[in-house]
Image (cartoon, rainbow, N blue to C red):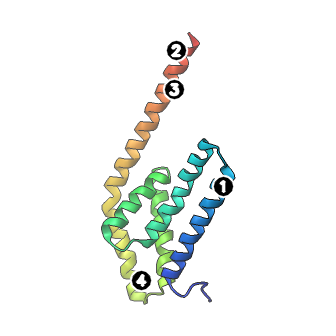
Amino acid sequence: SCLPFLTPKRALLRMQDDIQLLQQYFLERAGGHVTLARILTNEMRMLEVIFECLSVEDTDSLQTMIVVLHKRTGADTLVTRYFVGDLWALVTTLAKPARRRDNARNEYLRGVMQGLEPDLEMVSKGMKQQHWDLTKAKEKRNNVADL
């Protein structure tokens, strides 16, 4: 099989350039619409987070990126686990490690994910509570408006 990039670093540089190109294109299309530009910036942030996650080299940064991805994917632990696993598989495939090293890397990620499980659950609970609070506040506003 032929990979389009010789090294993972080169692939990441291309990805960074592509993200910048997409941002520039869509922000130019947004013109003077401030709200649309803000939405586009927020949506493009997900691509930046993915790029950062693929670029991290130390454990603390990886853990931080996993928590950020967890929030951005709707605070669903299963979705986060699969999403991070897919990104990890992409990076380790690009690096073409030896089979033994590949297993060690997978075990490392599994350990990081297990260590983060309580934090991810806490984030999920916090986001669910925030959603519930917003829903209740909207209901109260609607009830007041009906009076």
Q: Which residue does the numbered mark 3 point to in the structure image?
A: 138
- N-terminal of the pair, mark 1 or mark 2, is 1
Mark pair 1, 4: CA separation:
42 Å
Image point 57% across, 65% down: which residue? Answer: 20
Q: Which residue does the numbered mark 1 point to in the structure image?
A: 28
Dot 4 surroundings within 10 Å: few (below 14), some, or many (20 or more)? Answer: some
State which mark lies toward you, 1 or 4: 1
Mark pair 3, 1: CA separation:
35 Å
Q: Is residue 144 visible?
A: yes
Mark pair 2, 3: CA separation:
10 Å
Helix or strand or loop: what does disc 1 sit on? helix
- N-terminal of the pair, mark 3 or mark 1, is 1
Image point 48% across, 77% down: which residue? Answer: 91
Q: Is residue 137 above or below residue 42?
A: above
Q: Which residue does the numbered mark 2 point to in the structure image?
A: 144
Helix or strand or loop: what does disc 4 sit on? helix
Mark pair 3, 4: CA separation:
50 Å
Q: Type of residue at label 1?
A: Glu
Q: Type of residue at label 4?
A: Asp
